[in-house]
Amino acid sequence: MEAIYTARATAYGDGRNGHVTSDDDVLDVDLAIPKEMGGPGGELSNPEQLFAAGYAACFHSALKIVAKKVGVSTEGSTVAASVGIGPDGDAYGLQVTLAVELPSAGRDEGEKALEAAHQVCPYSRATRGNIQVTLQLV
């Protein structure tokens, strides 16, 4: 694969209680460990939220591309990503649920569009076989 775009971000400070910026300074975010993981939580983001945002946006784009090819309407569609983190043996693991609304599509065609998007979305391809990803048509 030859990259046509490369995103760059740098983490500073104390990791999950630190700060991240992109090389173009568009992304400039303070981070905090969520309360559920023993941190302060509050109004700061965390790596799982950033991953969820990226996955939701990428999957939504993939869904729109594949749906258009097969004639499935994506009018009013949304993709909500939930990213969970927890102990996995001696390490930590992630799990993802993608809850997709396709209000203008029938159930069968909607589920087929989700599966097709899951095959072409770069995030889905990168995580396949590494973490559990659940697709939900809501």
Image: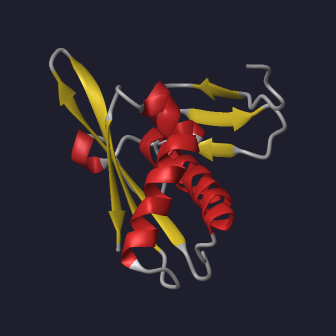
- Image mark count: 0
| Residue 102 placement (x, y as % from top left) | 49, 76
Residue sitting farthest toward the top: 90
Residue sitting farthest toward the left: 89
Please report the residue visible at 19 percent of the width from the left and 25 percent of the height from the top: 88
| Residue 108 placement (x, y as % from top left) | 38, 71
Q: Is residue 100 among what the camera can see?
A: no
Please report the residue visible at 58 percent of the width from the left and 42 percent of the height from the top: 120
Please report the residue visible at 43 percent of the width from the left and 32 percent of the height from the top: 127
Quadrant where the N terminus lies? top right
Closer to the camera in the image, 53 or 38: 53
Report the coloring of the rendering: secondary structure
Rendered view: 57 above or below 8: below
Left or right side of 29 for 116: left
Rendered view: 84 above or below 78: above
Closer to the camera in the image, 57 or 84: 57
Residue sitting farthest toward the front: 70
| Residue 136 placement (x, y as % from top left) | 33, 63
| Residue 119 placement (x, y as % from top left) | 51, 42
Rendered view: 112 above or below 46: below
Residue 10 appears in which quarter of the rendering? top right
Q: Is residue 80 among what the camera can see?
A: yes
Quadrant where the C terminus lies? bottom left
Left or right side of 2 for 41: left
